[in-house]
Image: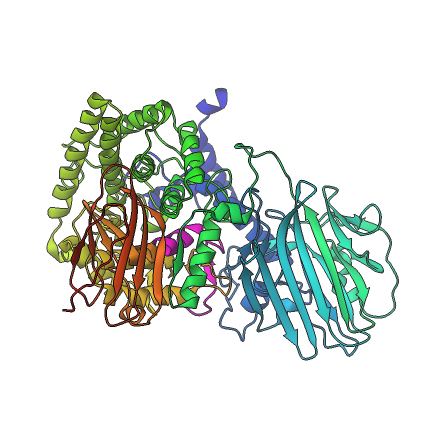
Amino acid sequence: MAWRWLPWRAIVRRAARAYGVIDPLRVMARLRRFSQPSEVAEPLELLRAGLVFHARGLVNTKAIQHNLDWVWPYWVVRQFDPGDASFIPRAFSFSHVNLTHRNWTAVGLPDCPHYPIVDPRGLWTPLHDGWSIDCWILAADGNHLLPGQCGEAQQVQDTDSGLAVDTTVSDGPRQLRLHASVERIDGRAWALLDITARGSSGDRLAIAVRPYNPEGIQFIDDLHRAPGGDGFRINDTSDIELDPAPTDLRFRSYRQGDVFHALDGDVTATGDGLHCPVGMATGAALYPMPDGERRLRARVALDDAPLPHGQRCSWAEAHADAATVEIPDAGLQRLFEAARTSLVLHSVDEIVPGPYTYRRFWFRDACLILHALLAGGYIERARRALAGFPERQRATGYFQSQEGEWDSNGQVLWAYGRFQAMTGESLPASWLDAIERGCRWIRRKRLRFDAGAGIGGLLPAGFSAEHLGPNDYYYWDDWWALAGLQEAARVLSDAGREHAAGRARQEAESLRQAIHRSIERIPHERSGGGMPAAPERRMDAGAIGSLVADYPLRLLPPADPWTVATIDYLERDSFFDGGFFQNMIHSGINAYLTLDIAQSLLRAGQPERAWPMIRRVAELASSTGHWPEAIHPRTGGGCMGDGQHVWAAAEWFMIIRSLFVREEGESLVIGSGLPPEWLQSGQRLRFGPTWTGWGRVDVEVETAGSNPRVRVYGRWHHRAPHTIACLPGWMDTPLSADGTAVELLPEAQ
């Protein structure tokens, strides 16, 4: 097209001079000098997501700080309060975004890809990236109960009969109880909010429509009475149905101010609605509380397109035959149940790493979440996800979710290999074809061996996992590619594609040598014997990415000197308050990366170092049992990413599994992470069934009596693995593993 031949650089520079602003091309050129040369400066998908995010932040800048007399959500109340630890000065902030309390919990069904979310004070956002409903008790004495302004609340996730979030907010005689869930009614999925309000005679309950959510402003241009008068119609697209119908509806536009200020007195209904040109319409449905109590239900219909696999299932059916755990720690067990539920909830059609901010696909997150699904026995969900991967593969063989990130091919090949090993199934021809194409892409993508000292034979510089730093030759990418090639060689060989398997095997060995040569040439004064993020990098927080060679890929032996030195460095220089603090991008304590380090310590036979990290991550969980991607070191709230990060849930599931069952080479290691207090508790410990590379396994440890008694139940695909009981404080003892119950009395050391 003709526009491609226009002299854009000259036009931009001339315009910058004309308007007296800095030349953006010169700035971009300077910024690129911080990175290694790369074919993609930054993935377009991430740029697009960042623009959307900060566009809302700019709207927040205009909408919030000039209207602090409005009723705002919990994060705004905290972050804009100069007396609060969450306070952030705003003078030179480009945009005002939630950086202190990025916490929310999703509800839903295991067969419905829609995720209504609830914030820590019960603010209910039923539709993705939509407006919200807040509930207030308007007190006759003026002491209103406004949840977002309350310092304390009780909030739990209820999984006993499905999935719900219960929030209770109290202030003196007044109490709000909010029960958020999703149910199928007459075949359609509905987001439900059941509300119970208790107060004094003369109080009123307000169901308020708010033009915001836990990220910030979400425009409401049109707000009207719903047909039938039993609720609201918002932007002419969705209805809030209220049962029973309210006695009064109030509406306000932005210029009139928040509807909250129109709720006092005896004003009657203010018409049937309005159009707000600013997009900040607010409304409230009012209910008298003559007896000091009121119950009602709000519901919003969710889109209910047929699922690709055409199946409906309940939560009980979704968890049938999946892994469960019995441990004498109710808190850790509750977190395991929450993690299990989160894995299922976010893998309905495609795997997504979060219900809101991250409700989109990345191969990186999907493959790690998929591995936890496989280990937990959610085989069909993993199968559905893998079946969709070839559709995302380009003709070049590149598995692309973000351009310029070179880890995805290795991750996909590794995931296919783990599926084949853990299920014992033969892979479909279409998957095998995709695997072959993926191997060829890695072979063609690698740098020539004469590309330069330290980088020859590696993958090119790329953006990789975005929290490792600017574009570089990341070992993270190379370790993933190596593991993927090794798995591909095994899978292709098992399928009789020996020529392709041989090429993959040869490529894997060539890459392994290139990685080792690169790391070995790094001066000790720069690496300290560990693995930096990239060949020319000093040791920094980005080195966490290189530990993938140990966990989950097991490309290095347990307690390898590179691994040990890297962990020692990170624990010394990149930990804060007991957890790994990722200084790059996240700028918070990262739950899943802390657990990854704990996994490496379990492999190294150092559970005494791993357990403080495990317990610290448990302490950092929300009251509903979830973690944001990164955690603010002062507020304990989320400061980065989605408020319910599914990768973190996957790693919690896997760390609990590793306490009982680990795969190590040709061996199955039983009980190596169980803490001494559990082994002395007198209670039964149990985990399973869990799927491994040899088949399905259940583990039981009876701790009553003087010695633990270990039982392993195996249902093997072909042969039983070499299995050892490795309980801390007891001798490593071989177990017979013939598929029957095996009892063992270890000898004390």
Q: Which of 362 and 93 is in front in this view?
A: 362
Residue for point 48% across, 55% down: 644
Residue for point 31% across, 25% down: 437
Task: Say which quadrant the C terminus sits in.
Answer: bottom left
Q: In this view, does 722 lie above or below 703?
A: above
Q: Nearer the viewer, residue 136 or 188?
A: 188
Residue for point 37% across, 23% down: 430
* First to last magenta residue range: 631-654
Q: Can residue 710 be seen in this view?
A: yes
Q: How many labels does the image show?
A: 0
Left or right of 686, for residue 21: right
Q: Was residue 462 drawn as part of the magenta stretch in this picture?
A: no
When asked about the image quadrant of residue 237, the answer is top right
Residue 627 on image: x %, y %? 45, 59
Residue 345 on image: x %, y %? 51, 47
Left or right of 652, for residue 315: right
Q: Was residue 645 drawn as part of the magenta stretch in this picture?
A: yes
Left or right of 4, for residue 277: right
Q: Which of 372 and 10 is in front in this view?
A: 372
Q: Is residue 568 above or below residue 366?
A: below
